[in-house]
Image (cartoon, rainbow, N blue to C red):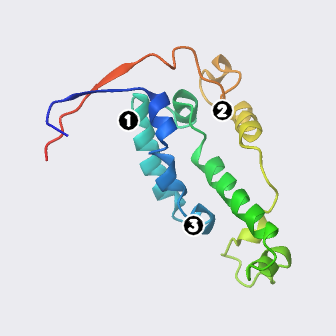
Amino acid sequence: MLSGTIAYWSTHVLKETNALTSAAEYCAPVWSRSAHTSRVDVQLNSTVHLISGTLCSTPLPWLPVLSNIEPPALRRKAATDKLVEKIIKHDSWPIQPDILNPPLLRLTSRKPLWLDLQPVDIKSRWRHNWKLAQVVNSHLVCDPTVWQPGFDLPWFLVTCVTL
């Protein structure tokens, strides 16, 4: 990219390309229960700040609503649910007995995949979490899963990238 170019982006285009979330969901069923997921979330939040054009002082619960991208924890849970569903369908996979008949939990610090096998509907869970959130002006948005008014308005991003 040339220095000082003007790029025309909309959040709809960025979401459709899945540039942000595909890298964050890569192997999410394996690392999503790690103690270090907060470090990944910090990077995702800063990227969503950039994409949505919000200020850094924007409360974190507002970021998914303003960008119309599901919260990272829910996206990771959906990726895990998809993997578990795929494992259950394939009888010949060696991991299937471990999921369906899990071994005893040996270390209390571990959070294995089979402790939470209930599939979750992302949209309904997001609505539920939004209703419970203690966020200033949350009453302005009844349903966080729908595009907010003005979402499709274009915005210009002036980049000063040097190689």
Q: Is residue 57 visible?
A: no
- Image disc number at residue 28: none
At mark 2, the secondary structure is loop
Kindly indicate the quadrant of the structure image that contains residue 46.
top left
At mark 1, the secondary structure is helix
Residue 127 is situated, as x and y percent measured from the top left of the image, at: 73, 33
Q: Determine the CA span between mark 3 and mark 1.
A: 25 Å
Between 104 and 81, the one nearer to me in the picture: 81
Foreground mark, 2 or 1, reads: 1
Foreground mark, 3 or 2, reads: 3
Q: Amino acid at mark 3?
A: Trp
Give the side of residue 35 with respect to residue 161, left or right.
right
Give the side of residue 34 with respect to residue 104, left or right.
left
Q: Which residue is mark 1?
A: 50
Q: Determine the CA span between mark 3 and mark 2.
A: 28 Å
Q: Amino acid at mark 1?
A: Leu
Graded by Cα atoms within 10 Å as few (under 14), some (14 to 19) or many (20 or more), the crowding at tag 1 reads few
Graded by Cα atoms within 10 Å as few (under 14), some (14 to 19) or many (20 or more), the crowding at tag 2 reads few
Proximity of marks 2 and 1: CB atoms separated by less than 8 Å: no
Question: In which quadrant will I find the N terminus?
Answer: top left
Graded by Cα atoms within 10 Å as few (under 14), some (14 to 19) or many (20 or more), the crowding at tag 3 reads some
Q: Which residue is mark 3?
A: 31
* Disc with the residue nearer the chain's start (2 vs 1): 1
* Disc with the residue nearer the chain's start (3 vs 1): 3
Q: Which residue is mark 2?
A: 134
Residue 64 is situated, as x and y percent measured from the top left of the image, at: 56, 35
Q: Amino acid at mark 2?
A: Gln
Between 97 and 105, the one nearer to me in the picture: 97
Q: Determine the CA span between mark 2 and mark 1.
A: 24 Å
Residue beneath the point at 80% across and 62% down: 117
